[in-house]
Amino acid sequence: MSQDDTTAAVATAPPPTEAGVPVARVEDLHVTFRRAGADIQAIRGVSLEVAPGEIVGLVGESGSGKSVLGLSLLGLLGGSPRTSGRAVVRGTDMLTAGAAERRDVRRLHLGAVFQDPMTSLNPTMRVGRQIVEAAGSQDEAVRLLTAVGVPDPARRLRAYPHELSGGLRQRVMIAMAVAGTPSLVIADEPTTALDVTVQAQVLGLVRRLRDEIGCAFLLVTHDLGVAAQVVDRVAVMYAGRITEVGPADEVLRNGAHPYGVALMRSRLSLRTDRDTPLLALPGSVPSPARPEPGCAFAPRCTLAGPDCTTTPPVPVEVAPGHLAACVRDLAEIRAFAAAVPAEEPPAAGTPSAATAPAAATAAGTDDAPVEEPAAVRVQNAYRTYSVGSGIGRRRPLQALRGVSLTVARGEAVAVVGESGSGKSTLLRLVAGLERADGGTIELGSAAGAQMVFQDSGASLTPWLTIGELVGERLRSAGVPRAERERRVAEALELVGLPAEVAKARGIQLSGGQRQRVGLARATVVPPEILLCDEPTSALDVSLAASVINLVGRLRRELDMAVLFVTHDLSVARVVADRIAVMYLGRIVEIGTADEITHRPRHPYTQALVTAVPDLGVEPPPPSGEPASPLDPPPGCAFHPRCPRATASCSDPGLDPRLAAQPGERTRLTACINLEVS
Amino acid sequence: MAIAEPAVVPPSPAPVVSRAGRPRRDLTRLQAWGGVGLLVAVTLLALLAKVVAPQDPLAPVGLPLQPPGSAGFPLGSDSIGRDVLSRVLVGLQLSWFGAIVVIASGLLVGGIIGLVAGAVGGWVDTVLMRFTDLFLALPAPVLAIAVVAALGPGLRNTLLAVGVVWWPFYARIVRGEIRTLRARPHVEAARLAGTGGVRIALRHLLPGAVPAAVVAASLDVGALVLTLAGLSFLGLGQPAPAAELGADSARNLSYLLQQWWIPVMPGVAVMLLALAGNVAGDGVRILLDKR
Amino acid sequence: MSARGAVTGGVGPAAATAGPAAAAALRRVTGVPLVRLLAKRLVAAAVIVVALATSVFVLQRLSPLDPAKAMLGPGASASAVAQQRAKLGLDDPFAAQLGRYLVGLPQGDLGMSYRTRRPVMTDLGAFVPATAELASTAIVLALLLGIFFAVSTSLRWPGASVLRGVLMAGASAPAFLLGIGAILVFYKQLGWLPASGRSGITDLPGGPTGLLVLDGLLAGRFDVVSDALKHLVLPALAISFGPAVAIGRVLRTSLSSEERSDYARTARAKGLTDGAVLRRHVLRNAVGPALSMTGLQVGLMFAGVLVVEQIFAWPGIGQYTAQSIPVADFPAIAGVTLLLGIGYVVINTVVDILQGLADPRITT
C-alpha cells in the first residue's frame, strides 16, 4: 500500500445528526486480500460514521468494496485479509478485538441481513429454532415475526426455509437481525433477490423498524432507487473508496462528484426521457489488483485532467454534511451535471412513424388482430410444466394460461412481470425453444426470431471462439468460410466490438462485451424479431444503459421488431413502444409505454408502478406476494392482493378478459372492477 | 462525459481481450505436473518391464528363499528360486495396462452411453440411465467376481468382468455433465442458430464433459489397480506360473512368517502403483478441474 | 477413489406406480412424505434385488460350464448327464427356468453346491455369522476412523501434513498388504494380537446369533468377548483403512465447504461461538456426502472381507468363496454374490433413508 493511499480519501462523515456517540465508526479502513498471487485492494481508505437510528446507504457498482465494508463491521471478513485502520462498533474495533469480544458485539449490538435468504438460512433447521438462537425464547420469536409482518407466526416457526416464499424468508432474516434490539443492522443487498412489489414491502419494513426500535441500518445496495427511497444519508463507493457522502436527497439530486452524477444520469426511472439515448458511462470499473494511483474514476471521467491521476483527491465539504472527493470546482461539476448531451439519434423506444403501433385497436376480445403484417402473433397460448423433485408428487405448473399478443413489424413490446408471471416462458415459445400446449404462435416471415439471453456469459459456449459462435448461423445457412468471416466482423462492428474479438473466447470478455457478442450473434442475419430476456438485469447501471441504447440502435438500423422481457418497469418504459403486464400466466394489461407507466389502470399495474423505488417516492406497499403458478387463485389471479377485489373476483367461473375502455384505442385491461376515470 | 455508444475502444490502454484467469499458486501446479510426470514414468517402466527385469520371471535362476539383497536377488527369491523383482516388474506391467485398458474402454462405452442419454434426453435417457443405475446400485467388485467365476478365470475374463461393472460410473458422470451443460443457455443459443443435433452434441456439449470424465478416470487408476489385485489375490487371474501381483502374494502366504518378502513385495508393488495412480489422478484433477 | 463420490446417484430406479385403486387407498398414508420416501426406497431396493438375481441367473447360463456335468463329475456318461439335465429342468425354456429360479430364491433355494453337494443356503448359513461380525465391525470402524481422519487432518497441528501423506499411502495399499503387514508387525514382531481365526477359546457359547461378541455378552462370558474383539482388530483394520480414508476425505471437504456457507455466516453474525455453529448448523448439513460415501465404500469393504478372511483364516464366506473359485462352483459363488449384493442394497437403502431424515428438503 503506498503512502498516498493511507493519507488519502479520508471522507470524514459529518457529525451524527442526533446527540450521542455514533454506533459505528470506520476510520481510514484498508482491506487487502491475497488472491492468486496478486493483491486485491478491496477497500483503500474509507472513513464513515453511522449515528444511532440512522439509515445509511452504501451505494456502488459490483467490485466497489461495499460488501467488504459491511463484513468488516461485522468482524466476519473471510480469507484472512490484511487490514489497517479501524472499524469500531459500540467502542469495539471489529478488526483487532479478540474473537470472544467480537462475538459479544455481534450478539448484543449487531444484526445482519444478507442478499439471498435461501442460502443464508440453514436449510435443515426449522426457522423457529434459528430465530430463537438470536431471540432467546419462543415467545420472543413469535413477537419478532409478528413485528416483521409474517402472518400466522406460530405456524411459520415450524416451517423449514424452503417451505417459505422469498419475501417471508427475508422477513425471517430481518426478524433474526433485529432480535435483541441491536444498535446497528448491516443489510447487504437485502432486496436484490426479491420481486419488485416484495422489495417495496421490505424497504417499508426497514423504515418502520428503525422508527419503532430505533436501530441504525447500514444498507448496502447497488440500486440507487433503493437507496433513494429509504436512506437518510448516502455514501457512494467506487473502487474501494468513498467518492461522496452526504444527506440522501442532496447526494442523489445535487451530486458533487462526477461519478455520482454519471451514475444518477445513467440510471433509469419512470421519469427517464425516452426520446434521447441513455447516458452510459464509458469504460469499466478498474481492476482492484491494479488500482489507479490517483482518483480511481479519472480514466472514465470527462472532467479528468493530469492533476487527477497523481494523488487521490481529498474530500471537501460542498454543502452542510455533504463531502465529495474531487479536485474539480463544484461549479464545474454542476455545469457538467446540467449539460445536455449532444444531439444523438433517439434511444431505444421512440416509435418512428413507420413503426408506430397500430396494434391492438380495440375490439371486444383479446389483443385485437392487426391489419398490417405482424412480426409475431401469439394467440391464446397455454404452457404447463410438470414439476416435482425428490420424492414429491409431480404437479402441474401453469406458466401460461391463455396469452395473446401481437407484435407489429418493427415494433418494440416489453413484457413486464414478477417471478412466476410466465414472461420468460412466453419468450421461449416465440423463440421456438419450447412448444405451446395450446394456442398458436405465428412468425411474420422466414427471418424468424433470435434471442439475447439474460446471462450473456452462459449463452456463449466456453470452448468455442466468438467467431465460431457468431458465424454459426451463417454456417447453418451454408455461407462459405471467407464470406462468413467477413460478415462476422461486420456484425461485431455493428455492436461496437473490434474484429479481433472473434478470436477470443467468452471467458476473456467483460460482461458488457459478452452481451454485445450476444447481440451480434442474434443479428448477424437480421431476424424479423429480436427477443431479449432480461439482458440488462445482471449488469451494472452504467453498462445496462449502453446495452439498452444498443438494442434501440440495432432495432432501427436492422428494422427488427423487439420483444423485451424484464421485471423492471423503468427499463420497459425506455425500450418499448408498448408494455404488456403479466401476472401468473396472463396478460392483465397492455398499452403504450406511457399509458402503462403514467396512467396504469389495472390494480396490479398500479401496484407495480408504485413499487418502483425512486427519490421521494413513498409507496403504499402492495400487500402479499405473487401466488405460486402451481396453485393460481381462482377467478382473477390477483384478487387475494387486490385492494379493489369484490366477491365476484374470486368466482372460479370468472375469466377476466382483456378489454378496452370506450374511447381508447391502444390500451386493454383485464379487470372487472375498473375505476372509470 | 461521453454519451452512449462510445465504448468501441476502451479508454485505458488495456488490451481489448483481457488475459484469462491467472494460473493458480505455482506450487500446486508444480505438484500437479509432478503427478502427471509420475504417470508417464510409471507407464514407461511398465512398457519396458521385460527389458528392465534382470531375470526370467518364470524360471528358477538360483537358490530358493534368498532374502532381499542377496547376490543376484535385489528383492529376494521365491520358494523355487525365481527372482521376485523380475516377477514384480512383469506383474506391474500387467496391473498397469490392465487398469488402463479397463479405464479406456469404460470411458469409451460409458462416454458414448452418457453422451447419448444426456444429449437425446426423454425416454432414451430414462432407459439408459435406469440400466446404468442398476449397475451402480450393486457392489462392483463383488459383481466382477461373479462374472469371472461364470466366464472362467484368466486375465482376459478378469478385465472383461471389471470392464463390465466399471463403465456405468463414467456413463453417470458424462450424462450428468451433459445434462448440466444442456440446461445452460449456450445450448439453446446454438439451437436458435440453427445448429443440428449431432453438431450440438459434439461441439457444444461433449467438450464440456471431457474434463470431468478424464478427472474421474485418472482418479480411478489407483482404485482399479487395487481391484484387479484383489481379484487376482482371490485366484481369478492367470493360472499358476504367470507372474501376477495379487496371486503371487496369495500363493505365498504360507511363507509370510519366515520369508516375509515373498508375499509382501508384490503387495508393496501394488501399493506403489496405486499411489502413483492416485497422485497422478490428483494432478490431473488440479490441472483440469475448473471448480 | 474420490471419483466415486461424484456418482452417488442414489439407488436408481424408483417410481412406485400403483394401480388407481391402490393409489386411492394409499393416498392417505403416502401423504406423509417420510412414508412416501420409505415406500419408494423399498420398492427401488426390491427392483434392484430382482435385477441382481436375474443377472446372476443369466451369468450362470452364459457360463461354459454345464451344471449337470459339474454335479456328476468328469466321469459321468452322456446319458447320465442328459438325465440330470432333465431332472434339473435345464432343457426347459429360458423364461420358465428364470421364473423357477426367482420363485425359489425367497424360499432360500440357491441351488446345490457342486463341491460340497449341499444346498448353498445351508453352506452360507454356516459361514455367514463370522463374516457378518467382521463386516459390521469393519463398517463401524471405517466410520469412526473416517471421522477421526477428517478432524485430525483439518486441525492445524505440525503432524497434519505428514498424517495426510500417511493416509494417502495407506489408502493406496491393497487390503491384503495391510493384512499381512499387520500380521508381521502386531503378531510376529510385537506379539500383541492374534493373527488367525475368530477365537482361541474352545468352549464357545453356542448361540444364539453366531456373533461371538454378542453371544459372549449374552452369556456373560467376558473372556469370550475380549478374545473375539482381539481377533477382530487386525482383519477389521485391514478392511476398513482405505474406505475410512475415503470417508474422511469427503467429510473434511463437506465440513469445510459448509463452514464457509452463507447460513454459517448468518449463524456467526448472530454471535454464536464457532463450536455452536459447527454443532448446531454445519454438522447436519455436512453428513450427507459422508453417508453416501460410506454406503458406496461398503462394496469395496465386501471385496476386502473376501480377501482378508483368507489371510486371517477367518471362517467366513471369504473362505467359502476361495474354495469355490478354483473348482468353478458357480452356484456357491452366485449365492455369495446374491448375499453380498442384497447386503449392499440394504445398507444403501438405509443410507438413503438416513439422508432423508437429515435433510428436510428431501422429505417435505
Image (cartoon, coloured by chain):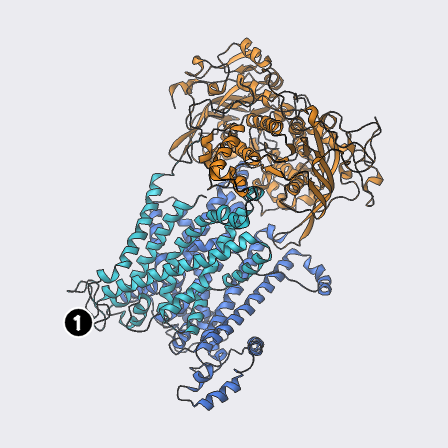
Image: C232 above or below C252: below
- For image coordinates 30% across by 51% down, the residue present is B38
Query: In which quarter of the view is residue C195 placed?
Result: bottom left
| Chain containing mark 1 | B
Assess disc 1: are there few (<14), some (14-19) or many (≥20) residues with their C-alpha within 10 Å of its C-alpha: some
Residue A429, image x, y percentages? 66, 43
Residue A324, image x, y percentages? 52, 15
Image quadrant where one finds the N terminus of chain A: top left
Q: Do we see residue A397 in this rendering?
A: yes
Image quadrant where one finds the C terminus of chain A: top right
Q: For the residue labelled by badge 1, is the local secondary structure a helix, a strand or a loop?
A: loop
Question: Mark 1 highlights which residue?
Answer: B63
Residue C102, image x, y percentages? 56, 75
Total numbered labels: 1
Q: Residue furthest left?
A: B71
Q: Is residue A582 left or right of residue B213?
A: right
Q: Do we see residue C254 in this rendering?
A: no
Image: A571 above or below C325: above
Residue A387, image x, y percentages? 65, 50
Image: C287 above or below A271: below
Q: From the rendered image, report the letter of the chain displayed in blue.
A: C
Q: Is residue A617 left or right of residue B161?
A: right
- For image coordinates 78% across by 31% down, the residue present is A361
Q: Nearer the viewer, residue A18 or A276?
A: A276
Q: Is residue C285 left or right of residue B146?
A: right
The amino acid type found where label 1 is placed reads Leu
Q: Colour of chain B?
A: cyan
Q: Nearer the viewer, residue A665 or B185?
A: A665
Q: From the rendered image, report the letter of the chain displayed in orange.
A: A
